[in-house]
Amino acid sequence: MLHLSGGATASALLLTAPAAVPLAVAGAYALAGPRTRRPAAAALPRARRAETTEAVPVLVAEKPEPDTATRRPAPDRAGLVSPVVILTCGSLLAADVVDGGPRTAYSGLLRADGLTAWMLLVVGAVALIACGSSPSYLVGERAAGRANDRTVWHYHVLVQAFLAAMCLAVVTANLGVLWVAIETTTIVTAFLVGHRRTRTSVEAAWKYVVICSAGIALAFLGTVLIYYAARQAGISEAWALDWPTLVARADRLDPAVTRLGITLIILGFGAKAGLIPLHAWLPDAHSQAPAPVSALMSGVLLSVAFAAILRYRVIADAALGTGFTRVLLASIALLTLALAAGLLLAQRDYKRMLAYSSMEHMSLIALAAAIGSPLALSAALLHIAGHGLAKSVAFCASGRILQLTGTARIGRVRGLLAQVPSTAGLFGLAVVALMAFPPFSLFASELGIARAGFAAGAGLGWATAIALLLVLLAFAALALRTARMLLGPGTPAGESPSALWPLAMGLGACAALGVTAGPLTDLLHTAARAIGGH
């Protein structure tokens, strides 16, 4: 990685661009998108003219007519600008923070340390896979009559706003702004979950909004309590939610208030991360959202929310000692993992199967955070990257499978390797990566978590052993159901090469990380130290 010098201006540019560029691209889509004219009454069919005169509107179950646009929509590939910018900024910031320590801008409102740079790289890589897969996915949706120019325009604007909100959550040092950014992801993705406007998707969107809003409300209360504790400790109003200030003065915080605040924050942001008890939105939302959106939600949104928990964990450990968060996170991790393994064994829908797999992997990351050693935290961060890459490939491939077969039921899908060998092969390899087979990075990260757990003492050793048994159950469920889908006779179908390159690239990156972290090794260790892995 190249080192970037240039002082405060360069730092401000690199910290601003990851959120500002997706917003600019969203604005470009909004300006270039279709502006429709309402058809004249005389041009409507007689039956529909009669309906427009009714006092009460009537929903008509018919195929939507194409929009009459005054201008052509922006090209689908324009969405790739944002992931490239995010990756570039993440790489340059990584070189800077490894060599020279954290970078700040706007009086400390934005800040980059090792965790920031690592998460920007993960967001950018997963976004590149999702945005690269979007054009071919949207072509299939248009061909099936489930999308038109206006719905595609909405999709692009919302996806870019989603990326901007996640990047803001990653680069801000103010815990209040962090809360606002994560709440913004809830608002934006609710419209993406209900993108198809079917009864099932709208129901999933409402469920997502209600449960995640409850979680975000808990996180808000926890943030208010941390602010109160900071003010009582003599920290000025302007810096009472500044993360570096809170870490430096955590020993002054009131233990009782801090304990309650941290508990609410872990439960609240844990809802966005797919952890018990507010996890029920995840399988419905991920199964109903467009496939590239599911890739973003599972691949990075869950991890961005958990990165917020990692930030607060540093404050809690300094204020309360390591025992409190260790017990809380380990308990939540084991309960979530047990639920995910049980539901995977009974699952009959392959998109929901992938969603429950996300719960399994997030619980492993939570267990690593509970262990808290340098090895465990490095393994957790590597697991975040590997899971994001593999899960985004799996969800994007599942979107093509759904368009081909017309069903998400595992029992109705057979012979994918014979029908679409390239897509099915990439889907199968993504599931193999999620099952932590070498050479994929999840093998190295799970091995690191297991080693750290057994080395941490008897209590965490037993927790790690139980987690490994539950992982084996999830492994068996994924293997059996994926083999059922891939094997068997089938009629060959056409495949688009443009739909395959993002998936192949994602699996290649996941395998490369499993072999060696290469130039990312120093960044990985720097990020682990930033969240308490001393």
Image (spheres, grey):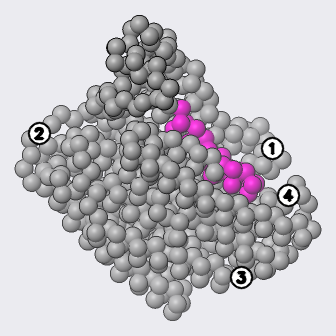
Answer with mark 1 or mark 4, whichever residue precedes in sequence.
1
Q: Is 488 on the left-hand or right-hand side of 469?
A: left
Q: Quadrant of residue 11?
A: top right
SS type, badge 4: helix
Residue shown at the point (30%, 39%) measured from the top left: 500
Please name which of the two marks, 1 or 4, marks the residue nearer to the observer: 4
Which residue lies under the disc numbered 3? 321
Q: Which residue carries the number 4 mark?
A: 239
Examine the image and state in which quarter residue 313 appears. Answer: bottom right
Give neighbour class at mark 4: few <14, some 14-19, many 20+ (Cα, 10 Å). some
Residue drawn at 54 percent across, 32 percent down: 157
Residue type highlighted by circle 2? Pro
User: Which residue was labeled with disc 1?
Assistant: 106
Distance, label 4 to label 3, CA atoms, is 23 Å
Callout 4–callout 2 Cβ contact below 8 Å = no
Residue span colored magenta = 157-182
Mark 4 or mark 2: name the one nearer the start of the chain.
4
Q: Residues within 10 Å of mark 1 (few under 14, many from 20)?
A: few
